[in-house]
Amino acid sequence: MHRFLARQSVDGSRPIGVCARRRARSWSTAACWTVIRSSAMAATSRTVDSLRVMSRIAVVLPALGLVSILFGAIAAPAVAAAGHKQPLECPPAHAKQITVDKQAVIYKAPGPPEDGEEGFPTLFACAFGHRRYMLGEPAEFGPEGGGGIARETLVGVMVAYEKSLIPAPNGHDSFVIYVRDLLTGRIVHEAPTAEAKFPGEVGKDSAEKIVLKRDGSVAWIDQTEPHEFQIRAVDKTGNRLLAVSGDIVPRSLSLKGSTLRWIEDGKPTYAILH
């Protein structure tokens, strides 16, 4: 009998187990059942109380969830604003502006410090409200060579420029046209100023003038021989040679919309920049 009673505890509480042990000593069956009924009633009462608490929690939790959602909706923008780093001033107050467009600027400022001293004057470009990109030091040439950035051109958020190095590490000269998107920093186009005539060369002499479209399509005039000029373009159709002549007027290249214009043999000549 006492083993059965011990196993029938409603919630594992002690009274039924105690009844079973005391029944073995001298308790009557009626006394035992009285204790069992009392214990069962107490356990039932506790169960009802637990259910009431759980029902209250079930009512409160959705409300707390709603409060959490509302708090998150209110706090999230503030947290995001606090974690968002404001873009650096562009251009900085001390910078010398070279070319300004409604959307971007090219400026000159000290480059990265070297050996604890202020860096050399360097050209930077940035779209307003975005990070800056270093183009390089302005081009300088001497008896032993030189190079740098030249012919920088700005249209919208696109910047085009020539980067030269004389001599390059391989002992030959290098002249390359770059177009960079100032919103993303991506190099949109990269092309030598002309086809190389000798192994190891990259480009042929410095570009006379660069013109640029808002989508990054670019064209330029390059002197390839003492009395010869080329007009080249890089656009949606690829890298193209538009004209070669000794009668092209240097720096006569212009762009209106998608129409290129230059003076050749004393008269205007036209092409489309796609």
Image (spheres, helix red, strand yellow):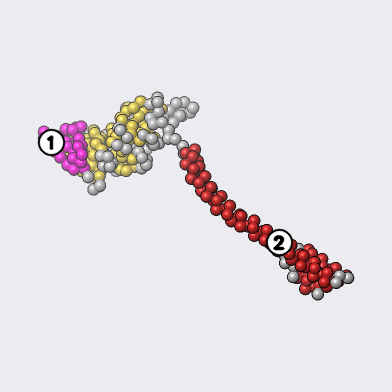
| Residue drawn 20% across the image and 37% down it | 255
Q: Quadrant of residue 250?
A: top left
Instruction: Tell which circle, 2 or 1, labels the residue nearer the N-terminal end.
Output: 2
Residue type at the position of mark 2: Ser
**Mark 2 secondary-structure assignment:** helix
Residue type at the position of mark 1: Pro
Give yes or no for residue 107 being in the magenta stretch: no
Q: Quadrant of residue 205?
A: top left
What x and y, as percent, mark residue 202?
A: 30, 40
| Residue drawn 78% across the image and 68% down it | 36
The answer to which of 198 and 241 lies nearer the viewer is 241
Magenta stretch: give its range.
246-273
Total residue callouts: 2
Q: How many angstroms separate mark 2 from mark 1 (CA)?
A: 103 Å
Horizontally, residue 124 falls left or right of residue 222, namely right
* Above or below: residue 192 compared with residue 27: above
Single out the residue that lies furthest toward the bottom.
Answer: 1
| Residue drawn 19% across the image and 37% down it | 256
Q: Which of labels 2 and 1 is toward the front?
A: 2
Q: Which residue is mark 1?
A: 268
Q: Is residue 236 visible?
A: yes
Q: Which residue is mark 2?
A: 45
Give yes or no for residue 268 being in the magenta stretch: yes
What x and y, as percent, mark residue 1?
A: 81, 75
Category of crowding for the residue at label 1, using alpha-carbon neighbours closer than 10 angstroms: few (below 14), some (14–19), many (at least 20)? few
